[in-house]
Amino acid sequence: MTQISQRGKTIFASPFRKYLPLADAAKARGVDVIHLNIGQPDFPMPANTVQDFRWTGPDFVPYGVAEGETALREQWCRYYEKFDIQVHHGQVLITTGASEALQLALLAIADPGDEIIVPEPFYANYNGFCQIAGVNIVPLPSSIDDGFPLPEMDAFASAITDRTRCILLSNPNNPSGKIYPPAHLEQLLRLAVEHDIYLLIDEAYSEFVYDGFDFQSILTFRGADQHVIVADSVSKRFNACGLRVGAMVSRNAEVITTVTNYSRLRLSPPMLAQGLANSLLQTGPEYFESLREEFARRRQIILDRLSRMEGVVFHAPEGAFYILARLPIADSEHFSSWLLQEFSHDNRTVMVAPGTGFYAGEGCGLDEVRIAYILEPQRIELAMDCLERALAEYPQRTIQETTAITGLK
Ligand SMILES: Cc1ncc(COP(=O)(O)O)c(C=O)c1O
């Protein structure tokens, strides 16, 4: 009997993308949809990398080796030197984005029914990655009310069972923008060693740190090498999301061997993309300085605008390029689809990601949305005009508005 698997029927729906059909329908009606739902910035890749890139291989594109081209892995190690990370290219495995790095790492370290502890809110697709691996997320809440801090070590310790295989988090954090202080990372490492579990840290946003916050890669802490796995990516760092190149990094040889065995099943990472990623990784510091400056400017616009909206709670993100804000709404799924289906202001609307997808805990994130500050300032201002007006007009608003609609831009 033909059928669709239970897994397929219930697979987690990405909150950044699930309302895209509604956005397409709004566009078909002639509405300008401003996409603050997905972390894809509008900056160019580093100058010349695309123009200068030449395929120097044979006159066909062969498969590469499963673990990625040695030249790229060596380049990744050189790039890491600026973060004081010393790794050998044998400890770096090239993947199709951080997404594949995370999925293969989970498949390597956990069996179906095992548990992964994840502080929430977390990068929504972890829900799907864990579901595919048959692994259960054990969420540890952190609240917007105190700025999404890392949960207390006692909370981690009491969540650990004999089925726990790792603690997973992104640093800088998507969606909260939190950067975890080195002292807290050190405590997590000690806990991982004590309970003999892994720390799987997603460092896709390592270049995006504001206000002098202290980002330290987990790979710089030594003495617990066997417990550390990092997922990394060129996607955000170089405005190359569609290149689909990332890496899984670990000094644990068994983890590398197991992930290599998995990666052989998909033969090799994309060859042309690996060549381009190699050039990208040679980009100088000025590129990131100007990106950080521009992101900080965009962040400030959002912060200024949100602070003028009644009933909106948020914290200035320390890194990455997202704000998870609490709005005066009771159901962020309904609000996000209402924005696309029923609302427009000057024939324009804004698309955001509903907060629920960034949690595993029942009922969490219902009054939160994630806003990505990835577009040029003028578009962000227009998007904030829409959000402000939408909150005033939304029929299910949970507090009485005091701002007269006529007072809005
Ligand atoms: C925290 C985090 N990890 C991983 C990814 C996926 O990255 P990639 O494009 O490298 O697969 C994203 C994408 O938004 C992300 O925000």
Image (cartoon, rainbow, N blue to C red):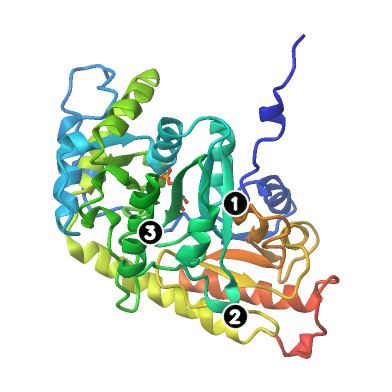
Disc 1 residue type (three-letter): Phe
Q: Quadrant of residue 264?
A: top left
Tell me the quadrant of the picture where the C terminus can be found: bottom right
The residue drawn where x is 30% and y is 66% is: 215
User: Which of the two discs, 2 and 1, labels the residue nearer the N terminus?
Assistant: 1
Viewer-side residue, 131 vs 402: 131
Residue 239 in the image: x percent, y percent? 36, 53
Q: Quadrant of residue 178?
A: bottom left
Left or right of 9 on screen, residue 188 = left
Q: Seen from this angle, which residue lies furthest right?
A: 395
Where is residue 287 shown, x and y percent of the image? 24, 62
Residue placed under numbered mark 2 in the picture: 306
- Specify the label residue 7 is tagged with: none
Vertical relation: 157 (above or below) 149: above
* Structural crowding at the residue carrying mark 1, measured as other residues with C-alpha within 10 Å and reported as few (<14), some (14–19) or many (≥20): many
Q: Which residue is mark 1?
A: 16
